[in-house]
Image (cartoon, helix red, strand yellow):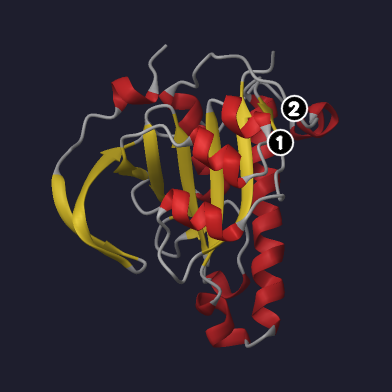
Amino acid sequence: MRSLSLFMTAIGVIFLSFQGRPLTEAKISSLPQPSLKGDVSVEEALARRRSIRSFSEEKLTTEEISQLLWAAQGITQRGTGFRTAPSAGALYPLEVYLVTEDGLFHYMSQGHRLERLEDSDLRNELAGAALGQRAVREAAVDFVVTAVYSRTTRKYGPRGERYVHIEVGHLGQNIHLQAVALGLGSLSVGAFSDEQVRRVLSLPKEEVPLYIIPVGHPK
């Protein structure tokens, strides 16, 4: 089984400016195509879902990571760009980051790709920002979901903030259910310092961290 580090062969070094991130050299890599069929029904995934707080050291395969990212924010209809999670006005204010042993990555729904932002393992630092929660440090992958509220509030005003929060719940449940279907465990983490998470991930100023979801193989 291949780890993310083995699969991450860059298809090019490009100059990129994305959602407020300053121009910088970024490695962009394609992900395997997600599967649209599985062995676990929606009903079974709902029945099995539990909060897992202890993970083994086993890594996730690139295929598993690809499937989880697609479940979170994958595009399901070409042309419209509609995604797996509903979004008010199809404005998609959420961004998804991965914190792994192999580095920090940003998911690009368009093209189902990963942008490598950092080569270092930031899980210890992220766990520190999350009040020292062990699950964040031990999980093979920490999904960090951020929001750019202005994408939604420009159209809907203050009510748009509620729509963003509804959307992050949809995204989170998609990850949790997909994790169950893959035989993995996951945890919902909301206890963290926003400012510390910003610093650990070097987030653009307009992005607000909302959710951390550790995912891995249960012990």
Q: Is residue 27 left or right of residue 113?
A: left
Closer to the camera in the image, 200 or 60 = 200
Residue 157 in the image: state x and y as whole percent: 63, 88
Q: Quadrant of the C terminus?
A: top right
Q: Position of residue 130 (x, y in %)?
A: 64, 44
The first of marks 1 and 2 along the sequence is: 2
Q: Is residue 120 left or right of residue 47?
A: left
- Mark 1 near mark 2, Cβ–Cβ under 8 Å? yes
Above or below residue 118? Residue 92 is below
Cα distance in 3D space between marks 1 and 2: 6 Å
Residue 71 visible in the current orientation: no
Identified by mark 2, the residue type is Ile
Q: Whole-percent x and y of residue 210?
A: 62, 58
Whether 152 is drawn above or below 2: the answer is below
Q: Is residue 21 visible?
A: yes
Reading the image, the residue beneath label 2 is: 52
According to the image, label 1 marks what residue? 187
Residue at point 69%, 37% (across, down): 176
Counting other residues with Cα less than 10 Å from the Cα at mark 1, is it few (<14), some (14-19), or many (20 or more)?
many
